[in-house]
Amino acid sequence: MKFSFQAKSSLGDLREGQIEAVSRDAAATMLQAKGLVPISIEQEKKVPEVIKDLQHLWEGINLREVAVFYRQMSTLIEAKVAIIYSMRAVADQTENTYLRTVIWDMVDDLEDGMPLSESMSKHPDVFESLAVSMVQAGEISGNLERSISFLAENAEKNYDLTSKIRSALFYPTFVLSAAVIIGFVVSTLVLPKLTAVFKDMGVEVPWYTRALMSFGDFMSQYWWAALLFLIALISGTIYYLRSEDGKREWDVVKMKIPIVGNVFKFVYLARFSENLAVLLAGGIPIVRALTIISSVVNSTAYESVILRAADEVKKGGTMSSVFARSSHFPPIVPQMIKIGEDSGKISEVLNHIAVFYGKETDNITRNLSTMLEPILISLLGIGVAILVFAILIPIYNLSSMM
């Protein structure tokens, strides 16, 4: 615990500061050992829940920060530093205010005698059920160091996978967003001025030019309505995709998208195999491990299949038989898992599967921009072609007649 103190030195000087101790009496003893006479010793108050919620909303916690936390803890514990001192050291150098507050709360829990896994379970927005179960298994087996090391490696791999997807999708997302913005500006400001030439001269134009002229007139007058509609459409789509039904449908649809769908599928398979291998290697029973993994894969489509596999194993069956009946698992995956089940080396087999699909993800994400670039260029070319045929060619014909 942290205590704020006021004390007098042997020279009568007033000293103020903070000191860490297990109790107020222990803090007073530590001050006296330093030649100080305590005047007041007050335990620091915990950060109110409302403040913590605001910190979380403002800063949030990303995968990189959690991975760094596990790696720092793993390094300190491997160096034989006591876990409480390790937590304090990590908290002191954590830049994220909310994560630092969470770590100090955990330090207080540990000082009160609470197990690390139980303290972590109080912060589900930071520590997933997989992490809590791994730490709990390490506490039971007496090998907490190995469990934290597993978590560090696992968090880093998950972060790498997520970063690869974001990097691969950044380019097409940026291009499409820029195209929408430019199209909105052109149709609102530029198009009405170009079509004004035809109106002023009163010439006959093709039907597609008239359609574009009507669209430009509408945008010039009611651009605000179009903008509100676009914002409402995007907001409504995001809201629906975050709902339970929307997330379930999107998880299925996005794996059917050409090219990009394979990226999601390979990431889910790699994440499933890697995390399940970690849990099984940590001594977690297979039914509980599958239940935990179902919420970690981050796909409702895979979650339902994995939960069915857990029920099948609970009844005495095998998870490979469930995976073999699912279209979300390529045939090679249940076949390899069955070999692992028969040989008793399921964890090793899962590691091989994770490595394979990790490499497949690397290959696709590395070439994704190259594969999507012709599609994006074609879409932009179609937009430019429409503008040329509907506006510029009639203007050219008109000028040649004059």
Image (cartoon, rainbow, N blue to C red):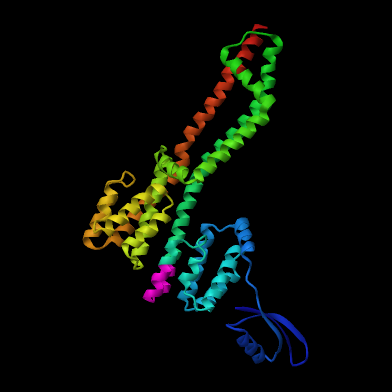
Q: Position of residue 23 (x, y in %)?
A: 59, 83
Image quadrant where residue 189 sits: top right
Residue at horizontal 54 percent and vertical 29 percent from the top: 380
Residue 284, compared with residue 326, is above or below; it is: below
Q: Is residue 188 visible?
A: yes
Q: Is residue 338 left or right of residue 379?
A: left
For the point 64% across and 91% down, the residue is: 33
Q: Residue furthest right?
A: 12
Quarter of the figure that contains the C terminus: top right
- Where does the magenta region start and end? 134-149
Give the farthest residue toward the top.
401
Task: Report the number of discs.
Answer: 0
Residue 394 in picture, x, y percent from top left: 61, 13
x, y percentage for residue 218?
A: 65, 23
Q: Is residue 139 magenta?
A: yes
Q: Which residue lies most toward the left here? A: 342
Task: Please give the name of the residue rendered at 39% of the width and 39% of the height, measured from the top-left corner.
Answer: 256
Relative placement, left or right, of 260 versus 55 is left
The quarter of the picture where the N terminus appears is: bottom right
Image height of 16 relative to 349, above or below: below
Q: Quadrant of residue 29?
A: bottom right
Q: Which sits in the foreground, 120 or 336? A: 120
In the rendered view, would you say 291 is above or below 323? below
Q: Is residue 161 left or right of residue 200?
A: left
Residue visible at 35% across and 54% down in the picture: 307
Residue 68 or residue 286, whichever sits in front: 286
In which image quadrant can residue 132 be found?
Answer: bottom left
Q: Position of residue 284 (x, y in %)?
A: 35, 66
Q: Inspect the magenta stretch and tell me whether residue 51 lies in it.
A: no
Name the one closer to the observer, 219 or 122: 122
Image: 327 above or below 45: above
